[in-house]
Structure formats: C-alpha cells, structure tokens
Amino acid sequence: MSIIFVLIPIALIFVCVGIGIFFWAVKSEQFEDLDRQGINILFDDKNKSKHDDDRPS
Amino acid sequence: MASNQGLCFHCNEVIPKGVNLHVSILGSSQAMCCQGCAAVAQTIIESGLEDYYQHRTAAAPSAQGLVPDALVKMLEYDDESVQLEFVAQNENSKEVLLSIEGIACAACAWLIEKQLLHIPGVQKIHVNSTTQRATLVWDDQHVKLSQLLQSVQKLGYNATPFQTDKQEEIDRKLYRSHLLKLGVAGLATMQVMMFAIALYGDLFDDMELIYRDYFRWVSLIMATPVLLFSAQPFYFGAYRSLKAKTLNMDVPVSIALLGAYSASLYATVNGTGEVYFESVSMFTFLLLLGRLLELRARRKASETSSNMLKLVPKLAMRIDESGQQQKVAASQLKHSDIIVILPGEVVPADGQVVFGESEFDESSLTGESLPITKKHGDKVFAGTINHEQTVHLEVEAVSQNTFIANIMRLQEQAQSEKPKIATIADSVARYFVFGLLVIAALTYTYWHFHSPEDAFWITLAVLVATCPCALSLATPAALTAATHKLSKTGLLVKRGHVLESLAKVTSVVSDKTGTLTEGKLQIKHVNTRDDVDETTTLNLIGALEAQSSHPIANAFSEYQSYTAKNIEHHTGLGLSGEVKGLQLKLGKASFCGQPAEPKAGMLELVLMVDDKLAARVYLSDTIKKDAVRFSQGLKTRDISLSMLTGDDSAQVEYVAKQLHITDISSGALPQQKLEVVRTKTQKSPHLLMLGDGVNDGPVLAAAPLSVAMGLGTDIAKSSADAVLLGSKLTTLLTAMDLAKKTKKIIAQNLAWALGYNALILPLAVAGIVTPYMAAIGMSLSSLAVLTNSLRLNKQ
C-alpha cells in the first residue's frame, strides 16, 4: 500500500501537465471552431503551404 | 456526397428545366444548376482542391446570386482612407477580419484557406467555420484586398470586412475564462472524487488513519485551485449582489463553498470531523457547466448578429474648385462640398440637390415603400439610394451629424432606458437565500446551547445538504435548452430576458413594409386592350425597365425578351423609349394623358404604344404568405396586433384590412414611432415590437421585447432582443408557445428543487444527514432538474 505515497504524487503531476495542456489549447483558440479540427486530418497535405507549391493559381 | 438525380452537385438545388451544364468532378461528370455553380466548381477543380467534394458534410451555397456588380464595390475596399476604418496595419502586412457568407461545413473553411494560400502576398489566413469568419494577413505590395475578396467570391462565398460588436467581445473573454475555470474544476473533480470514494469506504471498513489523512491532504491540494480559481465567478457575483443590497443565488453558493472548504481544511489539519472536498469540486464544476452552456448560446447569438454588421465602404465623388472629380472617403467630406451621386449609388452624406432631379429610395429611413422625387433645393439624406439620374449635392451634414446618425443615437438612448426585468430565479432566490441563512443561523444557535462541539458541523451540513445546486440550475438549464430549441426553429435570442418576456406577451406592434409585407413590388393585375397579348405587354415593359434600379423595375425583372433603345427617364412620372420599332410610354396615368383608374392599395402603371393606350398594370407590395396565419394565431392566443408604419400610402389600409388590424398608426417618423410605443407600453407593459428598417431601430431598442426580421437592416438587428431568421412570422407563434412551456418547466424545476431542499432541511437541522447521503441527494436532484429541462429540447 505504501506505493501510493509515490504513485499519487506522480498522478498529480500528470494532472498538472494535463491542465497545462488544456490552458495552452484554450489560449491558442483550439476550442473556437470545434467542427473544423476534426475534419482537417481528412484532407491531403499535397499542397499544404505556399512555399512548396509553385503552381500558378 | 452522392449525386442526386435532378439536383445540382454543387449546391444541391433543383436543376431548372432546360439547363444542361456539366463539370467533371472526381472522375465523373456532374450536373450543375446554373453558370455560377459551374464556374465555382470549375475553379475548385482547376485549383486542385477536388478534396473538398470528398469531405464536405453539407452542400455549398448556390452561386446563382453572385453577380459582377459586387466586384465593382470591392475595388472600393482598396482605398487607403476607407481601409483606415477596418484594417490593422502591421510592419509590412495588413490584417483584416472578414465575415464570410455561405460557409456550410468545415470543408468550406479548408477550401477557402487553400485557395488563398496559393496567392503570393497572402501571409496568413484562418477561417473559422463555426463563426463564419476569417482572419486574413496579407502584404499590400503584392496583392490588393479586392483581389483576395474576389478569389473568395470565385469559390462561391461572399466575403466582407465587418466590425465585431462590443457585447461579443465581452462574451468571448468571459467564455474563455469560464472554459479555463471549468477545465480546472473538471480535472480536479475527477481526482477528488476518486479519493472521496476511498474515503467513503472508510465508513464500512476501518482504514488506517495514516491513509485516511493522506487522502485528505491530497484532496485538499486538488480542491484548493478549484476554490481559489474556478469558483471566482460566484464570489464576484455574490459580492456584486451584496453591494447592491440584494441577495442572489451566488450568495449561498459562496457561503456553502467557503464554509465547506474551511471546515474540511480544519478537519484535515486536526484529523477530526468530515471532509467535503468532493462536494466543493463537483458543485463548482456543475454550476460552471450550466453557466458555460448559457454563455455559449448567448455568444452564438451575438456572433451571428455582429456578422451582420458589415462595413460597406463609403466613398464619395467630390467636385473640386477646378471642376475635376475625385474619389474621397465619405468621412473626409466637409460642409458645402459638392458631390456627385450616380444612379444606383447610396448617398454618403446629408445634403441639398443643386443640380439634376431624381428619385430617391428612402424606405430604410421612413418606411415609405415608393421612391420620392427630389428636385433642386430638396433635402437628401445619407443612406438613401438614388434610383434614376445623376444629381449633384451640396453637403450639409457629414457622418456624426447626419439624419441616420441621429437615429442611431436615438436608438442607443432608448437601449439604455430598457427596463431591466429580473429573472424568475433571482426573485425566488432572494427569498430562498434569506430563509436559508436564517435557518442556518437558528440551527447554529440551537445546537450551540445543546451540543456546542457539534454546532458548527451541523450548521455546515445544513448549508451543504440544502446546497442550492438544483435550485440554481433550475432556471439556467431550462433556459439553455429552450434557447437552443429556439435557434433551431429560427429565432435567435440575443438577450437573456427574451424567453420570459415572450411567455407574457399581450400585444404585438408591427412595422409594415418588410415585416408584414415582402417589401417588394409585384405585378397584381394586368388589364390589356383586347387585341394586345399580356406576355408581350409585360416583355415590352421589361425592356423599358431593364436599365433601371427603381423598385418598380424589379417587378418586371423576369420579362427580358426584348431590348429597348433611346430610354428616357421622366423623374417622378415614368419612362419612354423605343422597343421593336414601337414608341413606348410608361408611367402614371397623367403622364400618359389618360384618366386614372385606381384600385385599392395598388399602384397603377399605364403603357402607351404609339400613343395609344395598350395596358394598365397594377402593382402592389405582397402581404407575406404567413402574415395572415400569424395574425390569426395571435387572435387565438388573445394577443392584440397593431400596425406602426412610416408609410402613409393607400397600401397601409389595404394591408390592415387583409390582416384584420384595426389599430393603425401610419406616416410615423422614428421619433414618433418611439413615442407611440412608449404610450402603448404604459397601457400594456408586455408588448412585443416587430420591425426591420433603420427607422425601427430606436423603437426596437425601447420596446420591452423586440424582434427584428432576419432580412432586415443591420441597425434593426443590432438593437432588437431577438432576430427572426428566415423572416418567417409563424416561427414567432411557435416561440411563444415554447416560452410558455419553458415557464412551466422552470416552475416544475423550482418546485422539485425547493421540495427536495424542504425535505432534507429538517433532517440536516436535526443532524441526521451524513455527508455521502447529502452528496448523493444533491447530485440526484440536480440530475432530475437537468433531465426535466432537456424535455424542452426534444419534440
């Protein structure tokens, strides 16, 4: 049972990390558009940024 | 998305007969309903963005309405002085917020981003599909804003710079801080509940004290940020209400939270008594969740309404001393400048006509549905539209001093006077909280004399067990569910009191043009000479009117078989011209030298072919299809309907008769409208105002409850309490019924919550309730309230 004296603080550290990530996510507007992020992964990245795409438009 | 037979692959609308357009998409040929959609689909394919069709979850908007006309307007956005109003200047880039019409799903957002990133000079583009907005950062050296707007347009969307309204900015910050607080409370609650279960186990099985204390200390660590950070909104709320010398729900919530926490802290440090950390955390979490949902609904409404506050560039053509014409921003105009107003243009400033003669559409200001002729020396107001010929104006008032700015000020004033209606919960809460505090104090006093060491604990148990959780959720939960349901049926609620007020409405005051009627002239009767064919007649008129932007011309827009030559405008009288070698004259009976044969509530047009009477055409503004059902629906609900309009033509009585309205005030200016509504409000305080025009702005802001039409002007929408999307009047009847039902559900919730508290209170006062019983009871009662509220959302 005495293992919980070690494990619970570790769990607490994880919780703190989780809260940290949550704060970051809220501040970087991840929750502003909930429909969007889920579908983003479906699109191909073949012409993701303008730098690696020289095709005239 | 599967292709449906007879439906446009791009916008999913029915393909009209005779249209045969196809675009090859994803390897197969797909049918399109119009040139617009075909062009948009072609652009998407050519840009290598076919993926869009694979992943979209909703059809695209129809591209039918996109006309090159709008492109000209976009060029005005490039003007430096115009950009000052809405563009943020960075070191070597510019940033603008765009509102984008027609975003249906996430794939649209992706499509727009990809397309714009192709363009050199675009540095950043982020499209938010929920709010239908985009942040665009670009380099002005490489590409102009108008070009970027055009490339969005080519994809079938309509992008316009806009201004966020103040309320939205406040809501956005509040939402974000609540979200952070909720996240902390949620994560902490999960942990604390875990330890709480272990601690409850203590009741059945003797746990070694060292573990019990360890769990308590860990719970304390987790509950502290919840108390200090997450629960802040309740403390501030309580502080504000105490400062205002009233009691609201936040007061007992704060007392219970602080009390339960301090007692638990005391118990943890001394190793005695009970701990309530899980109650503190869970209670905070649930309450925050309710508030967040409420906030989200409100935020959505304010976002939608501020998307409507589009910035239309206001440019003016000024004639300088040397007689040259130059373009300047309307804000730079000065008194006694001479400006040119072309046909179809919106007047940028108030002024006097010094040259020319034309008809001006003042419907947005006065509600008058037909244009008014303005000659030399007549006053013309900013915001009205020139219909016929070029005129020169001498500027008299600019921006803040214009007539329209005065209306806006009137509206702001009226808004600040709007009576504050206390919510049901607040009035119940005041008594409840007071009673609770008295009982807690009495309990403490009683036990202090009988069993001093238990007094504090029992008093605390009273506060925790009667924890007003269910009670404070009772109203917001029902309101949130109902607001959600309302926005699904088509009424966007912007302010909190709408549902409560809707349930009580006893009289409705409505504007006419655009609210009860379509606000557009339509052909009602055509009386032709015996040897003249009706279709030919209409096509002849259509040809004459083709070049005009007059509301009358719109009625004939579908008759475009011929083209006319030598068209002449006779301001305020009619038109003349030549079609198929025939000399035509169209206009008022007097203009054509014929006796008038008027029909009630209709506008008569006479057509002369080669100086002989050919036809009489009658036009009128059509009463909305559901206006009759709306007026009947109000009657069955015992709600009176009256009309308040700026129009004073024969139309008014005609419409009133059709809809069986007896109480009419016509020809009212914005200020007069305001007075009428104020007197009416004194007689029947539960009044609902319906309107759509600029001139309705102040009344909408002043009325106890106001609804603006979704197709109305931005000013009307920003001052109203709710916006009727799709402008369907019968939705309002559904909303009223829902509001009544909501009231019933709130009453049930309150009864349940109060009943539960009444039941548990004596037990707690007697010192019988154990902490886990209190926790279970509290959760169950909250759950019951939530489930009951969700019934509103179903059906």
Image: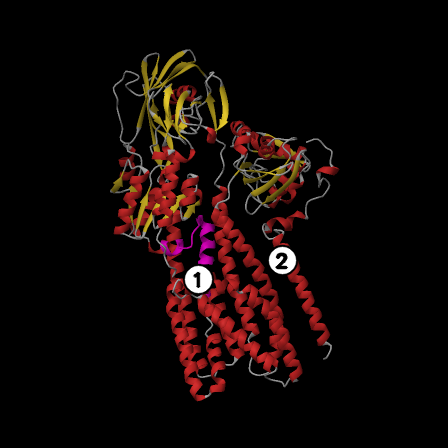
Q: Which residue is drawn at 34% across and 23% down?
A: B374
Badges 2 and 1, same chain? no
Q: Is residue B83 left or right of residue B670?
A: right
Q: Which residue is drawn at 56% across and 58% down?
A: B179
Q: Position of residue B310 (x, y in %)?
A: 49, 38
Is B284 placed above or below B552 here?
A: below
In the image shown, does B643 or B526 lie closer to the viewer? B643
The spot of residue B652 in percent (x, y) is: 29, 36
Looking at the magenta stretch, what is its main secondary structure? helix
Identify the chain of the residue marked 2, using the numbered disc in the image.
Answer: A
Residue closest to the eye, B732 or B502: B502
For residue B716, say whether it is visible. yes
**B133 left or right of B332 in image:** right
Amino acid type, label 1: Arg
Q: Is residue B83 above or below residue B259?
A: above
| Circle 1 crowding by C-alpha within 10 Å: few under 14, some 14–19, many from 20 | some
Circle 1: element type: helix
The label number, if any, that marks residue B595 in the structure image:
none
Local packing at callout 2 (Cα closer than 10 Å; few below 14, some 14-19, many 20+) is: some
Q: Is B558 in front, or is B96?
A: B96
User: Is residue B663 shown left or right of residue B511?
Assistant: left
**Would you name the residue on which mark 2 appears?**
A23
Q: Does the magenta stretch include residue B460?
A: no
B84 to B633, vertically: above or below: above
Where is residue B547 drawn, in percent x and y?
44, 21
Q: Distance between the residues labelled 2 and 1?
A: 28 Å
Chain ID of residue with mark 1: B
Q: Give the range drawn in magenta.
A: B472-501
Q: Mark 1 points at which residue?
A: B240
Which amino acid lies under the numbered mark 2 shown in the image of this protein? Phe
Of circles 2 and 1, which is in front?
A: 1
The front one of B617 and B251 is: B251
